[in-house]
Image (cartoon, rainbow, N blue to C red):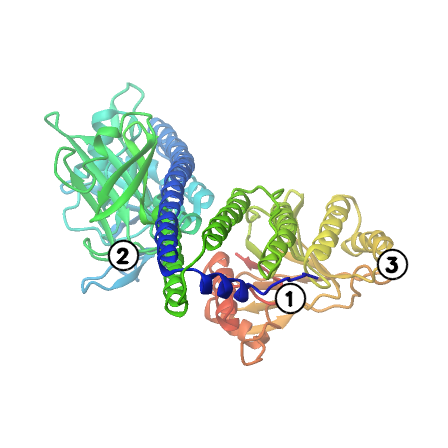
Amino acid sequence: MFGYHIKLRWKYFTILFIASLLPMLLVAVVSDRGSYRLGKAISDKTMQELSETVNREIVTVTQNYATIVQREKASVEFALGIITREAELALASPPPEPRKVYFAEDFDDPATAPVDIMESPIHEMYGDDGSIQMKKVSFMEPNFVLAPGVDHHTVQAQIDQLSSLTPTFRMILNQFGEEIYWLYVGLEQGVHAAYPGHGGYPDKWDHRDRPWYQWAKSRGNVHWGPPIVDATTKRLILTASSAIFDREGVLAGVAGIDLMIPTILLQKEVRSSLSNSVQSFLVGRESMPGGQTIGWILSQTRDNTGFGTREEKLQALKILPQEENDFAPLWPHLAPGSSGSVEMVFRGVDSLCSFAPISEEMYFVLIAPKSLVTRLPEEVGASFEQFARGQDVIFLVAMGVVLLLAAIIAFLVSRSNTKNVISMVGGFKKLEQGDFSVRLAIRYDDERDMVIHTFNQIVPKLEDQLRMSKELAFAKEVQQSLLPHKNPQLTGYEIAGQSIYCEETGGDYYDFIPIDQGRLAIVVGDVSGHGVSSALLMATVRAQLMQRVLLDGSSAKKLDDVNKQLCRDTEENGNFMTMFYAEIDSDQKEMVWVRAGHDPPILYDPRLDQFRELKGEGLALGVFAEYEYEQYCDTLSPGEIICIPTDGIWEITNPAGEMFGKDRLKAIIRENSQVTVDELLSTIITQVKSFCAADKPDDDITLVVIRVL
């Protein structure tokens, strides 16, 4: 393909043979200095542009996460407003009929505790020996605590009134889930009600002395104070509190909501979107008695649990803004409503600190080491230095071999080559900046033409690859939007689902379709193969199923109609889809299902410690248009767990070729039968990934978990 007049090595040999050592030495020095200046210029320019880009990116990310925290904060304040209004209505109404109430000390004795008391994985606490324990709580009953010196009989009316808030407490906790730690109301008469119910309060504990009570009492509206230590678990919490008034506008008490620190800091989400070296903080100011203002900083240095020593794991620092510390350069920039960034030294490392407001006196802060920005320019500079050293070696070897003086031709050729090399570098720079129209029009008539020809061939292929990558990323985004964005809420059930694709797109599918009040359709499907074609077929089935499920007819009839429609699309390509379709009813506590070639779901009854499968006859969708499906029905019992997976779970293999299998899946279900369905689902997915020892599995994985409450 390429015509070579003279081999490259012979050209250099001939030129160097007739050249002198002095001109070659001069060329070597000039070339080395030019390479150094070029490398330094590129490194400096890259540093400048990357710094500006990363700075904008981190500030934008900080603002986005601040917005997320603002929404969480607004939701908590809305819930606090509900508790405050319900408490004021209860205190303004006649006391209801007395009901059984539980005081904090009742929870410390199994004989007097509520029947539903159980260990809560959310409410972990420090033991006396420093160990981490799960605190026992009741989700049916609140606990009451009387301040020292308060007689039970004198406040019986207030106790009965606050006991009517129990449904409100349950409703709010069900809506927010693990985000909320404690809900409570404390009255001026010395009565304190908290939910979920628990014990473990210190002796002579008085809620009226707690900081959250004093904050709301002095301000009269919703207030977020600095972090405090929870009295019963010793965990660090963030509290929102609000004053409660009677009909005459006199302070009657305070309502409060405690939040766990990991929920607020979003440390795991921040690190997954930026880098593990990026740290998140909550920073705020608090006015103290006497007019003094302190600043407080909250950081989480251990994911998920938030436990640890003050120095090593979870810490809240109260500092004066004028004190010398790592955050000293940040305080002057924290004006109300302002956001931006500042460079500073943080824990001995040059860092970039970005901040965005959550409220008037509270900010979300991200700190990233500047090494994230400088690493690439340093690598570019090192590459040019290595290139220059390589050139020096070549010239030294050449000078040792060549004995004759170089002629003027050597100088002209060297200069010509330098120009051509710069032209090649210019082409690469344009390509680096995204100009795919660049082509090299240089000709050497030797082996270097292979480099130029290869460059000109690669550029359009790179453009095609980039376009395909963007299109696949968009397809992945579209397909992910078709899956449920949150778990459904159905009375009497706890439901969760998740899909993991082995490629950008996949053929697994699950959905939760509300049919009417109290009825929900649950769908899990698996298209043959995976990738873009499977994703398209999955989207087609989803559209057909969404339209048909809401119309009248039995479950079997619905799949009959979907199958007929699908067969028209698959009769020429031979694709098909297995599916398990089920409808559950919150009133009847029964499940009606249809199996369309899908593996039977696994049902586990913890009371009997027995497994069984929800079997039934059925052909895969898209195979035979005239096939008529049958539906099956079964009554569900409280506590039963139903797992509806695709075959990507038990057919996945480890590096030794061993399959995960259904027995391992059943063992995980049995061992985790008491946790929430979200935790059970997460445990199964984690152990499947660990078993296959790969970041991405070989097949799509989908799992839906249902618990009958």
**Residue type for callout 2:** Phe
Residue topped by disc 1? 601
Indicate whether 323 appears above or below 699: above
Query: Is residue 397 left or right of 560 when viewed as pictured?
Result: left
**What is the quadrant of residue 401 in the picture?**
bottom left
**Residue type for callout 3:** Glu
- The residue drawn where x is 50% and y is 50% is 421
Q: Is residue 34 visible?
A: yes
Q: Nearer the N terminus, badge 1 or badge 3?
A: 3
Q: Residue furthest left?
A: 290
Residue topped by disc 2? 307
Residue topped by disc 3? 571
Query: Is residue 342 left or right of 418 when viewed as pictured?
Result: left
Task: Tell me how far mark 2 sits from mark 3, CA to CA.
Answer: 58 Å
Task: Tell me how far mark 2 sits from mark 1, CA to CA.
Answer: 38 Å
Contact flag, marks 1 and 3 (Cβ < 8 Å): no
Indicate whether 520 appears above or below 62: below
